[in-house]
Image (cartoon, coloured by chain):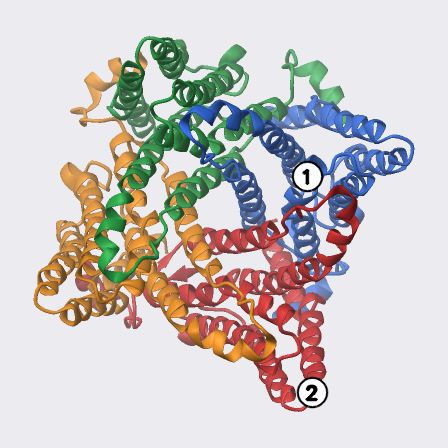
Chain colours: A red, B blue, C green, D orange
Amino acid sequence: MIGRRLRKHVRPPRRTGSVSGNERINTLNDGVFAIIITLLAFELRVPQVPEHDLGQAIWTMIPTILSYTITFVVLGIYWVGQHNMFLHIKRHDRTFMWLNILFLLIVAAMPFPAGLLIRYGQQQLAVVIYAATLAAAGLALNLIWWYASHDRRLVEKDIDPELVRFVHRRVLMAPVLYLLAIAASFISLTLAKVFFVVVAVLYILPNPLDHYHHSQVTRQEMLSE
Amino acid sequence: MIGRRLRKHVRPPRRTGSVSGNERINTLNDGVFAIIITLLAFELRVPQVPEHDLGQAIWTMIPTILSYTITFVVLGIYWVGQHNMFLHIKRHDRTFMWLNILFLLIVAAMPFPAGLLIRYGQQQLAVVIYAATLAAAGLALNLIWWYASHDRRLVEKDIDPELVRFVHRRVLMAPVLYLLAIAASFISLTLAKVFFVVVAVLYILPNPLDHYHHSQVTRQEMLSE
Amino acid sequence: MIGRRLRKHVRPPRRTGSVSGNERINTLNDGVFAIIITLLAFELRVPQVPEHDLGQAIWTMIPTILSYTITFVVLGIYWVGQHNMFLHIKRHDRTFMWLNILFLLIVAAMPFPAGLLIRYGQQQLAVVIYAATLAAAGLALNLIWWYASHDRRLVEKDIDPELVRFVHRRVLMAPVLYLLAIAASFISLTLAKVFFVVVAVLYILPNPLDHYHHSQVTRQEMLSE
Amino acid sequence: MIGRRLRKHVRPPRRTGSVSGNERINTLNDGVFAIIITLLAFELRVPQVPEHDLGQAIWTMIPTILSYTITFVVLGIYWVGQHNMFLHIKRHDRTFMWLNILFLLIVAAMPFPAGLLIRYGQQQLAVVIYAATLAAAGLALNLIWWYASHDRRLVEKDIDPELVRFVHRRVLMAPVLYLLAIAASFISLTLAKVFFVVVAVLYILPNPLDHYHHSQVTRQEMLSE
């Protein structure tokens, strides 16, 4: 193969081949997120009751609507998270695609633990399954970043090492907090749920990574002027 | 970080970092709309009746088919609305993504109030929930435009101020009319529904914004000739 | 507005403004088609019978599998049809987006008449609804082409007039045949179904439009060499 | 038509016309895969049992979760497979689109044989249907490659012949192994299932094709430096 001959002359081979252009992987991920949040909403069924009981029927749907909103927010966190991470990943290879499929496997299953938490919120098992699933999603995302950034495998060769470390810390924050939530669940389920809220707030608030994105854009604009 | 050093020299920092390239946000939004309208259609179930009762069974499906069409049109209005708005938004940041997720949260839930309106059209509660949901979607869209256009945060720096104001007025039109519909529902449900039809007609008809789009394209063509 | 001033000097205004870049409309359409064909497949449910009855249970699923395949082919025809047409459409405006939404409204509903035809194939009503829906989809597609190509509104100004006429004839072919099928259904349901097969075969076979696409590409390659 | 005149002068005509730009076909395929894996996950329903029976209820869901994971992996194999193949396909025509629709027809139906295998794993019929469906998907993919690469119809004219042969061999590997699994099922169902695991492992592991992708990128980088 031409490939084999070329490789000898040019540079030390990377461990796996990779190609640029991640549009299709992004389309797959965006598609999965779009479908989950839409299917969630579709669970809000029009009640079939006599006309004068409508108010009561809507009232009993409040937990379902709450559940919908919470899962929406959690999925939003992971969509924004992988979106921001993938801004820095410029190439992909087979292993990366499979790590991404692993991440989607966990994300696509998220409505299940979320529904479990709403329905059985007073049972430790539900709290633990919820926290474990979200921790697994965060770990999968961290694994993707480790794979992509190690040896600058799939990122720019001159990527800021500070940025690589920062993304690692930021993506690990959720799994660590969720594991703490699991530990806390042995003491108090309410304490565990406080952790869930803390994670959401931490990820929705703007943070230093956003500033980095800003400055990168600024730099590019400067270069192209 | 390189970013921090650069930022000092170049220009007064914006409040949050932002990056260009909204393709993935568009894919997410288009995906959500595509799925909702398809799932709606999927509710049209083949009736399971004896062969000679088919005509009757189809006849009883007319309200469902009507409901499908109306929700389709309403979703169409919001898809076209955000599509036209996003033509002018060139960048995104974390807050923008979350405002967009809020918009999707409301849009994805729309089949519910639409179904409610068809099933319980004679109940004020159904009319109010329908109008409130659509007003909320319009307000979320307006919030997105306010955030994106304020200080020219995510739009072109030299965007026509007239255009910014025009989009604001146009996007606010629906929530205002829906709030009027809620007020009207205390007098007459039929009057409230007239408002719903008025909104649809106003948004489907071509309007000055279309002319603006036209002229922008003309300008670009002139420059590139 | 800058737009209004510019327009006076440059060229006679088109009736509505239009912008180039149809990527998001394509994403919406591809999304709708992707979801329909997947939801169709999802109707193939694993039977819940005692183990030794599996063969029999699979056997009774043959009509469902057949229905799935036929609807898949019909949807394929319309996806390929709009795909090829949209290759020539370079811009869009509000009216175009609403005509496209009308087309999607009909396409998204197609599993319903297809299911009707399988379940009630011996009833004229089912045959007529099926033919009428597919004729409507074809007419909507033709309306889109008429709108886009009239006055070269949304296509290249120097588009081959022969091509414009050819696409018209080709897209009208299906509705004409489906209307003939409706007429035929008053004589014989079998004759009507023969028309359905004829339409499928005519659209799957390669045709002169394909050659035109080929030659366009050849021309571009020549110019860029 | 301009096309017909041009064609005579330039080069021997290919058998069918083709156009470059496969973005929409990719969007369709990614959409189908995204929807299947999400719908699969949605089958994981929150059990409705008394609170103290939750542990037991989760326990009985293990086979469903396992089924979900296996189908996810199988779909992942075919997504990665068509993704890598389509990297080399630069153009499309009507026949290619229909072969791709045939491939999607089989892929979209995959949750059915996968569910069958889990529910009726001790019945040869289920094992055979599962293997036959996956063999058919592989054969469809191979047909696509044969059509695209024969006479360099839809690939680069100077594509490495070694690569063309390698993709053929690699894509045929799965159908051959699945047909062997069908043969094995007459001796032992366990042996047949060993074949299924072997296929998964063979396709997830990195392979020479990845190295080829790597070297191609390296070559492009060299040229552009």
Image quadrant for the C terminus of chain B? top right
Circle 2: residue type = Ser
Left or right: residue A162 compared with residue D30: right
- Asked whether B9 or A209 is in front, the reply is A209
Circle 1: residue type = Ala
The chain letter for the residue carrying disc 2 is A
- Asked whether A204 or C64 is in front, the reply is C64
Check disc 1 and report its element: helix, strand or loop: helix
Return the x and y of residue A136 as percentages of the image width and height. Answer: 50, 75
Image quadrant for the N terminus of chain B? bottom right
Left or right: residue B160 compared with residue A214: right
The reply to whether residue A165 is visible in this rendering is no
Q: Which mark is residue A188?
A: 2
- Asked whether A204 or B129 is in front, the reply is B129
The chain letter for the residue carrying disc 1 is B
Residue B162: quadrant of the picture: top right
Cα gap from disc 2 to disc 1, whole angstroms = 41 Å
For label 1, the crowd category at 10 Å Cα-Cα, with few meaning under 14, some 14 to 19 and many 20 or more, is many
Left or right: residue D194 compared with residue A181: left
Q: Residue at x 20, y 49 (%)?
A: D136
For label 2, the crowd category at 10 Å Cα-Cα, with few meaning under 14, some 14 to 19 and many 20 or more, is few
Return the x and y of residue B20 as percentages of the image width and height. Answer: 60, 51
Return the x and y of residue D215 as percentages of the image width and height. Answer: 26, 60
Q: Which mark is residue B114?
A: 1
